[in-house]
Image: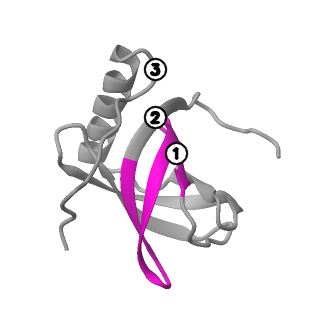
Amino acid sequence: MDDRRIRPRLSVNLDALWDSDEGRQTARITNFSEEGCYLDSVGETLVGEIVCFRVLMPDEDWLYLEGEVRHSRPDAGFGVRFVELNDEQREKIELILRDIKASGGIAMPISADLIPE
């Protein structure tokens, strides 16, 4: 695979939820940048598909994002490039990245015991 990332991705450990044809799926985001991220998940996606997902922020708030699937490994995960970010989403992404960098490059695990419906 040709790596065309503009910005380096940082290693993280963040909980996420995403919507698939089978319903809501859980995922673990394992790397994150200003441009995109990788979601470990058993759900299947297609390259080029737009995926809607939410990331659990360090302050226990949810960040809603949409991303175009750039590569996918069935039952393993997929990488997305963020699409149509607004100013609030960009600010929250920058907050996550600052937290990651402040913790030495790897975010502390964040777990969602209560997932809003």
Instruction: Give the mark toward the camera: 1 or 2.
Output: 2
Image point (27%, 36%), residue name: 91
Bounds of the magenta span? 15-40
Is the residue under label 2 in contact with that under label 1 (CB below 8 Å)? yes
Sequence-earlier tag: 1 or 2: 2
- Percent position (x, y) of residue 39? 52, 53
Dividing the picture into quarters, in which one does residue 46 lie?
A: bottom right
Q: Nearer the viewer, residue 5 or 103?
A: 103
Q: CA distance from mark 2 to mark 3?
A: 8 Å
Q: Quadrant of the C terminus?
A: bottom left
User: Residue 16 colored magenta?
Assistant: yes
Instruction: Give the mark toward the camera: 3 or 1.
Output: 3
Residue holding disc 3: 105
Element at label 2: strand
Outermost residue to the right: 1
Label 2 neighbour load within 10 Å: few <14, some 14-19, many 20+: many
Residue type beneath disc 3: Gly
Sequence-earlier tag: 3 or 1: 1
Element at label 1: strand
Residue holding disc 1: 37
Give the main secondary structure, helix, strand or loop, of the magenta stretch: strand
Image point (75%, 38%), residue name: 3
Is the residue under label 1 in contact with that under label 3 (CB below 8 Å)? no
Residue holding disc 2: 12
Sequence-earlier tag: 2 or 3: 2
Dividing the picture into quarters, in which one does residue 25 lie?
A: bottom left
Q: CA distance from mark 1 to mark 2?
A: 10 Å
Residue type beneath disc 1: Cys
- Percent position (x, y) of residue 12? 46, 34
